[in-house]
Amino acid sequence: MKHLPKHLQPRWRYLAVEFETWPDADFDRGDFQRQCWFAAQNLLGDVGSADLDLSVFRFDHDDGWGQSVIRVRRGETDRARAVLACIDEVNGDEIGLRVQGVSGTVRACEEKYIRRRPIASDQRNVVFENAERSGVVYDRGASDAPRGGRRVDVRCDDAFAGTTELDLE
């Protein structure tokens, strides 16, 4: 079977997505892909989600932080952003998504928007709400200082509380 001529081939855009979860969140690329499809179908219906043709191209998630490259048809990036804004959990684990940017090729998307992951330190004991608790400290480095610098997820009973260093003083 012959390939389509270049002018008839579908055109794609690639969205760089960064997300944060609690440190104990456990899901993989397939779970994230399924949630993207469900969100698209719920928001746009069958025909609209088929027009988007969302595909998770690259996926990395570990220790409460992750990033992904999502492929979408050209001209559908605004609707794809709306679909991603509807995602608040994957497999029952809460998730916060940010679209870092849009690019025309995977390579350009990775070079411009995909950053190295924040350095997660070992688990520490911290004082939160006048009690000593265990916490996971993420040091984002100087490049992310305007967005908070350090993030600390403190274990409270059977859940986590997201804090900063200022909350622990």
Image: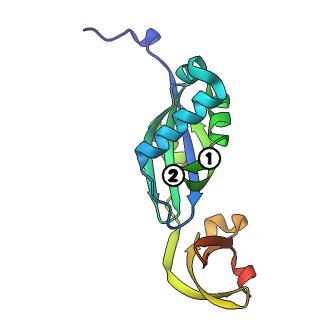
User: What residue is at 69 percent from the left and 75 percent from the top?
Assistant: 164
Q: How many marks?
A: 2
Instruction: Identify the mark at residue 100; answer none if there is no mark.
Output: 1
The x and y percentages for residue 116 are 49, 60
User: What residue is at 63 percent from the left and 35 percent from the top?
Assistant: 83
Note whether residue 75 is visible.
Answer: no
Query: Who is closer to the viewer here, 22 or 69?
Result: 22
Position above or below: 42 against 120 = above
Q: Residues within 10 Å of mark 2 (few under 14, many from 20)?
A: many
User: What residue is at 36 percent from the left and 9 percent from the top?
Assistant: 4
Instruction: Identify the mark at residue 67; answer none if there is no mark.
Output: 2
Residue 103 location, quadrant: top right
Drawn side of residue 124 relative to residue 82, left or right: left
Q: For the residue marked with disc 2, what is the amino acid?
A: Gln
Note whether residue 99 is visible.
Answer: yes
The x and y percentages for residue 105 are 48, 33
Q: Are marks 1 and 2 in contact (CB under 8 Å)?
A: yes
